Image: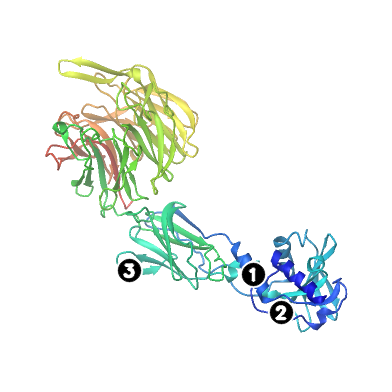
């Protein structure tokens, strides 16, 4: 009879995997434990828990552990003072101390609520001369008891009796045997070291707290005391980066970036976390967090200016370079870049934006179907972002900004007849690190298709994008003896819309002057400035109250305010008149205080302050030569130098329009 009862008991225990220990301890029940006495009510029958059942229970418990988890976060820092998180590499909860009876009972309640329902109070009592801490749980058919011996030769022994054991007193091992199940990470892999390794030289440094880590060409290797590599591999988006994860022996390797562009974020605190890695016994590792500071992009070891050039779809007009790079210290042209585009998709002035965190310069073509990417340090051409993967549409870029982890662009229509209606007046965003599309709006999202998006900016303090929209009625074309002349007239007033950068929802619309373009924000003052080409005015938008004030600029004839730049340090606004000068406005009154005469008929198409100087792109237009980049002294407002921007392809001058700059020392 006893054998039959014991067999049924073992089968029941194997079915529910009840209270399996993770090894150690004796399966022999103490003689005192076979004596029936309160508080354990039931038959005084000796029971055992065989090793095979214990191993089956252990395997079942281990298999329920979640798969490994990884994450990467990046927080931009200054290159001079990178903040390092001081986080321990030691796994939490290390040690094999026996749990207290309350800890053991609480765990049993949570792990097996059908056997130990509710939360019961721990009591203490004598049983056969042995003192026990125990809890009793009313269930159908009686009370399930679980207890821990507090005295006697089997002190620390764990016992149970009640309907769940067939009213047989059963010993389940010692209290210290349960620490692996109660907190599996205690028995999981322990981190031994974390190293940053140069992928070319093999040189390594301790990763935790490291500063000045080369963002490009390095990998992180975590080595554990024991590890099972099954299933620990693959490439995918992890947190803020693409990671390629591999495992060999007791080491897990993390290679950042998309294939061919292995890089951590530049100038950031990079934190990599890992948890749930298993050892051969199936127990998971605790979460470990390794933080190091990457080095800011060098950009050729000095400040650089980048211009987007009018490449031209007709090689007989101007087969120029797509981008030119200038050294700020020497004010010289140092590199020219071409993407090898076929005629028809070659108008590449567009916009250029520096992304020092991703280590990239973006160029959005005025007419095309992708955003081009150039390595900030080497000037090499990287994998482009394809707006239209099939390259079947020919959209005009009307703005390009960096917003959080994304780079966002407003698309227009390449002509006014509308043959290429595909994403006109749409907003598209791509992850800067994975190049994955994160948002694509519907057509007409930033404005009705009766309007044209004509430039955008981003205010980080307000986490908002601002897009200027022009009414099509403000555009004109006319036949003159010299050919077709086009431009903007007063027409219908334009708008600027405010887009929530987090939700991408349109929040507010501001009515400004005619044919607004290229808005610029003064975040400190909470003001937005918008040059209006059609009626030759400038609008100031109070972003707190929403009040718009539009003021004349005193321009006439063919003068048009096409570009604007904020010089906060000098309390100025620079406004190009599209002829041969730059108007200098007092920031408080928006009244003209002086002019910068560029001379030689040069037209300012873009402006940027870098190295204390005002850098200006100048172009006559796509049918004339002689275009250049001009350096202006901000104190005297005098032209200091004109830098020829001659094409390395055709020998003619490149025609720079868009401009941006990067100074790694700032």
Proximity of marks 1 and 3: CB atoms separated by less than 8 Å: no
Q: Nearer the viewer, residue 616 or 555?
A: 616
Asked if residue 594 can be seen in this view, the reply is yes
Q: Earlier in the sequence, mark 2 or mark 3?
A: 2
Task: Kindly indicate the quadrant of the structure image that contains residue 32.
Answer: bottom right
Q: Residues within 10 Å of mark 2 (few under 14, many from 20)?
A: some
Task: Kindly indicate the quadrant of the structure image that contains residue 107.
Answer: bottom right
Residue at image position (27%, 39%) is 659
Q: Residues within 10 Å of mark 1 (few under 14, many from 20)?
A: some
Q: Residue furthest left?
A: 651
> According to the image, label 3 marks what residue?
202
Residue 547, given in percent of the width and then of the height, sits at 47, 26
Image position of 11 with respect to 600: above or below: below
> According to the image, label 2 marks what residue?
27
Residue at image position (49%, 70%) is 227
Q: Earlier in the sequence, mark 1 or mark 3?
A: 1
Q: Secondary structure at mark 3?
A: loop
Alpha carbon separation for disc pair 1 and 3: 44 Å
Alpha carbon separation for disc pair 2 and 1: 15 Å
Q: Residue furthest right?
A: 37
Residue 166, given in percent of the width and then of the height, sits at 81, 68
Side (left or right) of 287 relative to 131:
left
Residue at image position (46%, 59%) is 272
Side (left or right) of 97 relative to 47:
left
Task: Kindly indicate the quadrant of the structure image that contains residue 199.
Answer: bottom left
Mark whose residue sits in front, 1 or 3:
1
Q: Residues within 10 Å of mark 3 (few under 14, many from 20)?
A: few
Asked if residue 455 can be seen in this view, the reply is no
Q: Earlier in the sequence, mark 2 or mark 1?
A: 2
Mark whose residue sits in front, 2 or 1:
1
Q: Nearer the viewer, residue 433 or 386?
A: 386
> According to the image, label 1 marks what residue?
56
């Amino acid at each position: 009879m006893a054998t039959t009862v014991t067999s049924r008991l073992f089968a029941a225990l194997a079915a529910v995997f009840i209270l399996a220990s993770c090894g150690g301890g004796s399966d022999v029940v103490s003689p005192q434990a076979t004596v029936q006495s309160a508080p354990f009510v039931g038959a005084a029958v000796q029971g055992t828990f065989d090793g095979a059942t214990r191993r089956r229970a252990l395997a079942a418990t281990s298999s329920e552990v979640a798969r490994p988890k990884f994450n990467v976060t990046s927080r931009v820092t200054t290159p001079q003072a990178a903040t390092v998180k001081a986080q321990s590499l030691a796994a939490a909860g290390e040690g094999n101390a026996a749990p207290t009876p309350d800890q053991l009972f609480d765990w049993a309640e949570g792990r097996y609520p059908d056997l130990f329902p509710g939360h019961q109070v721990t009591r203490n009592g004598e049983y056969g001369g042995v003192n026990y801490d125990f809890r009793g749980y009313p269930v159908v058919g009686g009370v399930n008891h679980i207890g821990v011996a507090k005295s006697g030769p089997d002190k620390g022994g764990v016992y149970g009796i009640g309907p769940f054991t067939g009213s047989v007193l059963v010993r389940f091992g010692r209290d210290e045997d349960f620490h692996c199940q109660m907190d599996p990470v205690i028995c999981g892999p322990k981190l031994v070291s974390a190293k940053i390794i140069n992928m070319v030289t093999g040189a390594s440094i301790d990763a935790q707290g490291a500063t000045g880590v080369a963002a490009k060409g390095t990998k992180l290797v975590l080595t554990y005391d024991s590890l099972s590599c099954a299933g620990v591999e693959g490439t995918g988006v992890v947190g803020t980066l693409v990671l390629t994860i591999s495992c060999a022996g007791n080491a897990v390797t993390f290679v950042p970036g998309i294939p061919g562009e292995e890089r951590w974020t530049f100038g950031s605190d990079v934190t990599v976390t890992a948890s749930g890695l298993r050892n051969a016994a199936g127990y998971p590792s605790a979460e470990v967090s390794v933080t190091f500071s990457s080095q800011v992009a060098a950009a050729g070891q000095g400040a650089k200016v980048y211009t987007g050039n009018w490449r031209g779809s007709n090689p007989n007009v101007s087969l120029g370079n797509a981008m030119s790079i200038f050294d700020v210290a020497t004010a010289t042209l140092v590199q020219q870049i071409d993407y090898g585009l076929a005629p028809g998709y070659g108008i590449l002035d567009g916009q250029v934006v520096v992304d020092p965190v991703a280590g990239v310069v973006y160029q959005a073509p005025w007419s095309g179907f992708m955003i081009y990417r150039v390595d900030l340090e080497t000037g090499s051409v990287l994998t482009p972002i394809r707006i239209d993967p099939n390259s079947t549409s020919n959209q005009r870029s009307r703005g390009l900004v960096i917003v959080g982890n994304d780079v966002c662009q407003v698309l227009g229509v390449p002509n006014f007849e509308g043959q290429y209606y595909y994403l006109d007046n749409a907003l598209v965003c791509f992850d800067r690190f994975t190049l994955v599309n994160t948002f694509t709006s519907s057509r007409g999202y930033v404005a009705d298709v009766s309007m044209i998006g004509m430039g955008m900016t981003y205010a980080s303090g307000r986490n908002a994008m601002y897009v200027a929209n022009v009414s099509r009625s403000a555009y004109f074309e006319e036949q003159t003896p010299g050919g077709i002349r086009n431009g903007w007239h007063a027409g219908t007033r334009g708008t600027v819309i405010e887009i929530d950068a987090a939700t991408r929802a349109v929040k507010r619309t501001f009515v400004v002057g005619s044919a607004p373009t290229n808005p610029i924000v003064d975040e400190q003052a909470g003001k937005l400035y918008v040059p209006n080409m059609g009626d030759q005015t400038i609008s100031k938008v109070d972003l707190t109250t929403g009040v718009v004030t539009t003021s004349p600029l005193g321009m006439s004839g063919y003068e048009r305010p096409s570009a604007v730049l904020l010089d906060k340090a000098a309390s100025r606004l620079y406004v190009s008149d599209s002829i041969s000068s730059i108007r200098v406005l007092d920031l408080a009154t928006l009244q003209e205080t002086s002019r910068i005469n560029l001379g030689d008929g040069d037209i300012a198409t873009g402006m940027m302050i870098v190295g204390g100087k005002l850098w200006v792109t100048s172009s006559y237009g796509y049918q004339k030569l002689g275009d250049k980049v001009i350096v202006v002294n901000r104190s005297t407002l005098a032209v200091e130098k004109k830098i020829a921007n001659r094409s390395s392809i055709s020998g003619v001058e490149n025609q720079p329009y868009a401009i941006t700059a990067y100074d790694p020392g700032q």
